[in-house]
Each structure stands twice: as structure tokens, then as C-alpha cells.
Image: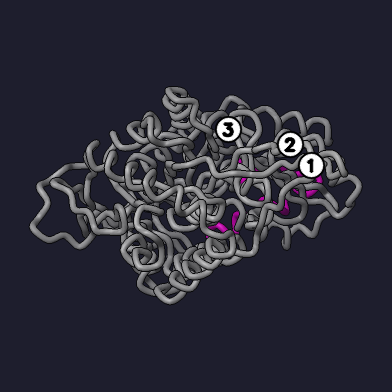
């Protein structure tokens, strides 16, 4: 990612203290469908980060003092703003992220939905004692300034997952989008300026230095990070400088378990979407697909037919199902995993041949029963490369599903509800879906076990992540 001197007027600016903030240097933003630079994004300096943090700290007491209903109303206004500008935002998102335009529109609408639903939430005091002699209540108070670091796979909706609960609970924020996908977020910052008091939401962009500056900054009280497990470990280490509170939503290598009593063709379609949605670039995608041996051949045939029928191409073209890998480093990582499969002689059921020409396009690829030590099973294949694997019995498949450092989510596909629930209870993951997949909601907590994260996003539990408990204990005086 090369840095260049910024022109006198740039199309995209940061938002700090309610105003546009330019930068002395910029970096190119690439359209992954063409690999061409189509825009420049500002690179924040350390001094500009200090300015953003100072603005957030100055704004936080007054924002926290506003009635809860006013902050709810602010979220409602943001939801309306997203929908009023949905088409412009979606088209920009497709250019920088690569997702097909209809799915980009869905992401903008999804973010609006998150704001609208959080605007209905509240945290009433928890009364522990209320007697003639004493009143004891637990209140939830804001943490202060939140540093939010957002990834490139769903840059708009995952930012909303952080902005909505943080602002509702009285915190202010410094938000950093991924440098691979900063533009739609920067544009939103511009649109949001009239709706929020200066300093409440600051949006800055930068290069590889900015993330560590944020996580170590003494003026930031909490970091909410979504990204890889390796980076999450570095965030945790850096944040220890002032014991920052942390929410880390990290990698996943989710298992899907398909039992023999299912409707094979119908379930194959649902699991396929759960595996390849967003070209497989989802932390909660089904990445290791275990299918009972009694139905394996039929299921695999249905999966292969779906893969071969899928249309991969530029997201701004009609009738495209799957766009490119978002960035070159991730594309190269997926090529490395594919080459490992070929070098070791694993059987490919579909895909496997990289298309010629420009663009970071990767075919939807299915690997038949790779061994447990295969690279694509040991590490997270964050792209459209998936393993189909046979199993014989429940004890075996549970052990294989749990044989991962990750524990974000998983799914069980089974008509027998009692059996499905018993399997789900044995999976070492923060979320288990039964006969569904990727049904994220503002009201459903999402958090990882093992190396898949710390803390929770969404739901009442996710809202509490942006608060601290304060126990108020009063002796009543006659």
C-alpha cells in the first residue's frame, strides 16, 4: 500500500470533533475486481489520533449526561440516514469491498436495522435490596472513550455493531476502518456530522501504524476489535498499558455437522450459502463440513452442482453471486492453501483453477476428505475453499469438530431435535445454530470460546460490554 502526497482537495476526509480533517498523505484504495486504484484515502498522523481522542474525551461527559431517550433517538436518526443514502453507500461499498451490489445494499440495510433495534434497548438498574433500612442497586455506567477497529469483510455492519451500543450507553468513540475498505465509512462520517454532537463519533483512517497507536493510547479506555486471532493477541498485549477493557471478536473455523435424517438437497443449499456467503470471507462461515457417511455422496453431489452453478465476477455486474477476494494478501493466502491441497494430492470435487485476467477472483473450491493435519483445516480458510468430510458416529464428529483452537460458532443439521440439542451442547463454541446458519441479530449475543475471542457482541450482554457496574448502597436514615 503506497503512500503519496495528498492533492489539494481530496474526495474523502476523516471526521474529528464534528469537522472534516484532511491528511498530508494518502494511500490508494483498490477495486478488488480490477486491482486498480480508484480513490485515495487519508493517512492519519499520531498527532491527528491525539486530536481525535482529545475530542472524544471532551465530548464524553456531556454525551453521557444526556437522557437515555435522547441517545436512543440519535441511533434512530442514524438508521434513517443509512437508508436515505443506501444506494450511494452500497455502490461505493461494492467498489472497495467487491461484494455484489444487491448484497452491498443488504449490508447498508443491516447496519440501519442494528441502529434501529439498539434504539429500543435499555439497561434498568438491578435492585438487590429495597427495604425500609437500605437500598442497594447496581447501575451500569459508561466506560469512557472507545477505540473501535473494524475489518474489511463487512466494514459497515460490523462498525454498527460497535457504534450503536457504545453511543447508546454514553461512551464516545474513535473508529478506525480497515485501510482496505475505508471509503464508505469515511463518507458515513461526513453524513453523520450534523446528527451527533462534535467529538461523539470520530472516524480516522491510516496505515499499519494506526491500529497499534489506538490500542496503546492512554486516552482510550476500551478497545473493540474484530479481526484475526493473531492480531487479537497483539491487541490484547498492547492494551495492557492502561488495563483497557476489551471486546475481541476473532477468527473462526466453524464446523457444520449434517446428520443422516435431513432433507439432503434442501440442507445442502442452506449449508452452501453458510459456507460461501461473501465469497467465504466471514468469521462465522461453515468451513469444515462434516456429513454422515450414509448421505455423504448425495450431499457432496448437491454441493458440487451448486458450486459449479455459482457465478463469480465483478460485483457491479448483473446476476453475479460471488465477488472477488477483497485484498491481495488474503488472495495470496488462499492460493497458498489451494497449492497445499494440490501438492499433497487432495481430491478436488469442484473449483481449483484460478481464472486468468485481472481481479482477485478465486473459484468456489471443494476438497474431498482432507486429512486432519491439512493446512486448510488447521488454519482458517478465509475465502471460498471448503472441506467436505465423512463421519460415522456422533462421538467421532464431536471430537473432530472440537479439534480446533477456534470456537466461534458451529451448526447442527438434524430433524431429531433431542439429538440435535445433545450434539450442540457438546460443541465448544460460543454459538451453535440448529437447522439454520449465520442468523446474527442485535438481540442474539455472539462471542467466541477458546482462541475466537474475549467478550460478547450484540444482545443485552453485548450492550453491557460498553459499561462498568457501579453498586450504589444506601443506608436509609429515619
Mark earlier in primary sequence (3, 2): 3
At a point 55% along the width and 38% down the height, the residue shown is: 247
- Residue 90 in the image, given as x and y percentages of width and height: 40, 68
For disc 1, the neighbor class at 10 Å (few under 14, some 14 to 19, many from 20) is some
Residue that carries the numbered disc 1 in the rendered image: 135
- Front residue of 262/356: it is 262
Labels 1 & 2 near each other (Cβ < 8 A): yes
Q: Splitting the image into 4 quarters, where does residue 398 fall?
A: top right
Residue that carries the numbered disc 2 in the rendered image: 473
Look at the image and say whether residue 293 sits in the magenta stretch. Answer: yes
Mark earlier in primary sequence (1, 2): 1
Q: Splitting the image into 4 quarters, where does residue 389 fall?
A: top right
Q: Is residue 101 left or right of residue 447?
A: left
Q: Is residue 104 left or right of residue 125?
A: left
For disc 3, the neighbor class at 10 Å (few under 14, some 14 to 19, many from 20) is some
- Residue 14 in the image, given as x and y percentages of width and height: 27, 54
Mark earlier in primary sequence (1, 3): 1
At a point 60% along the width and 54% down the height, the residue shown is: 304
Q: Splitting the image into 4 quarters, where does residue 262 fall?
A: bottom right
**Label 3 residue SS:** helix
**Label 2 residue SS:** strand
- Residue 420 lies, with reference to residue 371, above or below; the image says below
Residue that carries the numbered disc 3 in the rendered image: 377
Which residue range is magenta in the image? 286-309
Q: Marks 1 and 3, Cα distance to the nearest angstrom?
A: 55 Å
Amino acid at each position: 500500500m503506497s503512500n503519496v502526497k495528498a492533492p489539494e482537495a481530496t474526495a474523502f476526509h476523516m471526521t474529528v470533533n464534528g469537522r472534516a480533517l484532511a491528511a498530508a498523505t494518502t494511500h490508494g484504495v483498490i477495486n478488488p475486481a480490477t486491482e486498480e486504484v480508484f480513490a485515495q484515502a487519508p493517512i492519519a498522523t499520531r498527532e491527528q489520533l491525539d486530536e481525535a481522542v482529545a475530542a472524544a474525551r471532551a465530548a464524553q461527559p456531556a454525551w453521557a449526561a444526556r437522557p437515555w431517550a435522547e441517545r436512543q433517538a440519535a441511533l434512530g436518526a442514524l438508521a434513517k440516514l443509512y437508508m436515505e443514502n443506501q444506494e450511494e453507500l452500497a455502490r461505493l461499498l461494492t467498489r472497495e469491498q467487491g461484494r455484489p451490489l444487491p448484497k452491498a445494499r443488504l449490508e447498508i440495510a443491516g447496519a440501519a436495522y442494528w441502529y434501529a433495534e439498539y434504539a429500543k434497548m435499555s439497561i434498568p438498574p438491578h435492585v438487590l435490596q429495597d427495604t425500609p433500612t437500605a437500598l442497594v442497586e447496581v447501575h451500569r455506567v459508561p466506560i469512557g472513550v472507545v477505540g473501535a477497529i473494524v475489518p474489511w469483510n463487512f466494514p459497515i455492519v460490523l462498525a454498527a455493531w460497535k457504534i450503536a451500543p457504545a453511543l447508546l450507553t454514553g461512551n464516545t468513540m474513535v473508529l478506525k476502518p480497515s485501510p482496505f475498505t475505508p471509503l464508505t465509512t469515511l463518507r458515513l462520517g461526513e453524513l453523520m456530522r450534523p446528527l451527533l454532537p462534535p467529538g461523539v463519533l470520530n472516524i480516522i483512517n491510516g496505515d499499519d501504524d494506526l491500529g497499534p497507536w489506538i490500542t496503546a493510547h492512554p486516552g482510550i479506555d476500551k478497545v473493540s476489535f474484530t479481526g484475526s486471532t493473531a492480531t487479537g493477541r497483539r491487541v490484547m498485549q498492547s492494551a495492557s498499558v492502561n488495563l483497557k477493557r476489551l471486546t475481541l471478536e476473532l477468527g473462526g473455523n466453524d464446523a457444520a455437522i449434517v446428520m443422516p435424517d435431513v432433507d439432503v438437497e434442501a440442507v445442502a443449499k442452506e449449508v452452501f450459502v453458510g459456507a460461501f456467503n461473501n465469497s467465504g470471507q466471514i468469521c462465522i462461515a461453515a468451513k469444515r463440513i462434516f456429513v454422515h457417511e450414509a448421505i455423504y455422496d448425495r450431499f457432496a453431489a448437491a454441493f458440487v452442482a451448486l458450486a459449479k452453478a455459482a457465478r463469480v465476477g465483478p460485483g457491479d455486474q448483473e446476476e453475479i453471486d460471488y465477488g472477488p477476494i477483497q485484498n491481495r494478501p488474503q488472495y495470496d493466502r488462499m492460493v497458498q492453501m489451494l497449492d497445499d491441497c494440490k501438492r499433497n494430492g487432495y481430491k478436488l470435487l469442484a473449483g481449483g483453477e484460478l481464472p486468468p485476467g485481472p481481479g482477485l477472483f478465486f473459484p468456489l473450491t471443494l476438497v474431498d476428505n482432507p486429512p486432519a493435519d491439512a493446512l486448510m483445516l488447521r488454519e482458517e480458510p478465509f475465502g471460498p475453499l471448503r472441506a467436505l468430510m465423512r463421519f460415522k458416529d456422533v462421538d467421532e464428529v464431536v471430537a473432530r469438530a472440537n479439534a480446533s483452537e477456534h470456537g466461534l460458532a458451529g451448526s447442527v443439521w438434524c430433524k431429531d431435535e433431542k439429538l440435535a440439542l445433545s450434539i450442540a451442547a457438546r460443541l465448544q463454541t460460543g454459538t451453535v445454530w440448529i437447522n439454520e446458519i449465520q442468523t446474527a441479530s442485535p438481540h442474539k449475543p455472539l462471542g467466541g470460546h477458546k482462541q475466537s475471542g474475549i467478550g460478547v457482541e450484540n444482545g443485552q450482554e453485548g450492550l453491557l460490554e460498553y459499561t462498568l457496574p457501579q453498586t450504589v448502597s444506601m443506608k436509609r436514615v429515619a
